Image: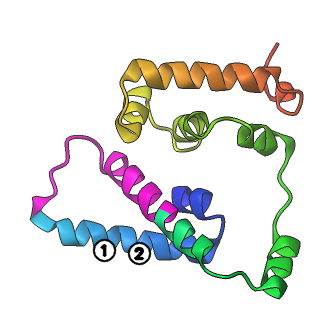
Amino acid sequence: MRLAQRFCGDDHDALDVLQETFLYVLKKGRALELRARFTTFLFPVVRNLALQRRRRQAALPADEGEAAADADSRVRHDDLVAALGGLPPEQQQTVMLRFVDGLSLAEVAEVQGVPVGTAKSRLHQALAALRNDPRARRYFLP
């Protein structure tokens, strides 16, 4: 659910994505072959379904009154979240999977479909950028 919320930005949409995810798993049925933890299998499914949903919604014409209400109801992001938002998407995802979702680097690499060395490199680059960002610097020990 947390991953769907991160990609959707809206609890209602995240619940819809979660439902679509489990429908996808049910359709796979016995053909589903797990070679890792179930959550590792679910991450790319949730990510892809959430991104598809965002693309479909972006294609719809926006209602100006609805857009203004959405802007007013959004929660203000703190400095750390803003600094994370400045990272490239691959680095953002690596940091979130590693520290928010608690995946090992091997699991992060599997979710992203990259070698473990690439996941390590992305994490290292992201943390270096966050340490150098004045908005996030206070979250890191000297």
- Residue at image point 41% right, 75% down: 19
Which stretch is magenta?
31-51
| Residue 23 found in image quarter | bottom left
Q: Residue at x 59, y 33 (%)?
A: 91
Q: Amino acid at mark 2?
A: Gln
For the image shown, how many numbered marks are present on the structure? 2
- Describe the element under mark 1 as helix, strand or loop: helix
Residue at image mark 2: 19
Q: What's the colour scheme?
A: rainbow
Q: Tell me the crowding category of disc 1: few under 14, some 14 to 19, or many 20 or more residues within 10 angstroms, Cα based.
A: few
Q: Is residue 8 above or below residue 116?
A: below
Residue 80 sits above or below residue 33 on the image: above
Q: Is residue 78 left or right of residue 118?
A: right
Which quarter of the figure is the C terminus placed in? top right
Is mark 1 in CB contact (under 8 Å) with mark 2? yes
Q: Which SS type dominates the magenta stretch?
A: helix
Image disc number at residue 10: none
Mark 2 burial class by Cα count in 10 Å: few <14, some 14-19, many 20+:
some
| Whole-percent x, y for residue 128 in the image | 70, 19
Q: CA distance from mark 1 to mark 2?
A: 6 Å
Q: Is residue 84 magenta?
A: no
Report which quarter residue 14 is drawn in.
Answer: bottom right
Query: In the drawing, does residue 9 fall left or right of residue 41?
Result: right
Q: Is residue 128 above or below residue 56?
A: above
Element marked by disc 2: helix
Residue 40 painted magenta: yes
The amino acid type found where label 1 is placed reads Leu
Compared to 76, does 103 lie above or below? above
Residue reaching furthest left? 30
The residue that appears at 31% across and 50% down in the rendered structure is 41
- The disc label shown at residue 23, or none: 1
Q: Which percent across, then down, holds residue 139?
A: 80, 29
